[in-house]
Image: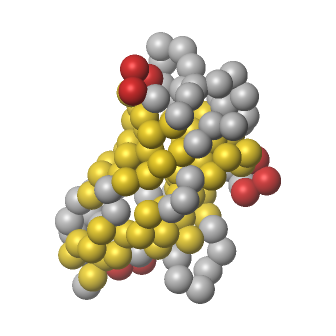
Amino acid sequence: QVQLVESGGGLVQAGDSLRLSCAASARTFSNVAMGWFRQPPGKEREFVAAISIWGSTDYAVYADSVKGRFTVSRDNAKNTVYLQMNSLKPEDTAVYYCVGSAKLRSLVPGDIHVWGQGTQVTVSS
């Protein structure tokens, strides 16, 4: 079973940037994509972004709420996926989860077969 370990969360101010990292214990054919969900306080988990992990071309999908501000990328040599978050807003405050999926699209929780433990991102106004 692949394990995902997130890092890079923290407390920042509105307008700041933060980069999350997700290291996978292995890259398996059961994973077509890796990406990020988040769970704001008192709300359900929501899709943030996903990227293909095979092939030489990066295919990425983003939630409308983060397009133009967040960028997902990968380093296959390190089995690591990143989420660069710019122009952060208080509404971006959430626990961010790294995920693995056999699909690449605007993911729903039912698409996910492996979850990381989560990392807290807090954006103050």
Q: Looking at the image, can residue 63 be seen?
A: no
For the point 27% across and 82% down, the residue is 124
**78 or 49: nearer the viewer:** 78
For this view, does 109 lie left or right of residue 84?
right
Please state, as top left, top right, bottom left or bottom right, where the N terminus lies in the image.
Answer: top right
User: Residue at left 44%, top 63%?
Assistant: 119
Give x and y (percent) for residue 64. 52, 57
The relative height of residue 116 versus residue 100 in the rendered view (above or below) is below
Of the pair 78 and 92, the residue shown nearer to us: 78
Q: Residue at x 73, y 57 (%)?
A: 109
> Is 1 in front, or is 97?
1
Q: Measured from the top left, where is residue 70 in percent x and y?
A: 37, 52
Residue located 40% across and 20% down the image: 77
Q: Is residue 73 above or below residue 40?
A: above
When asked about the image quadrant of residue 54, the answer is top right
What x and y, as percent, mark residue 105? 66, 41
Relative placement, left or right, of 74 versus 101 is: left
The extreme right residue here reads: 110
Q: Is residue 101 above or below residue 44?
A: above
Give the mark count. 0
72 versus 116 height, above or below: above
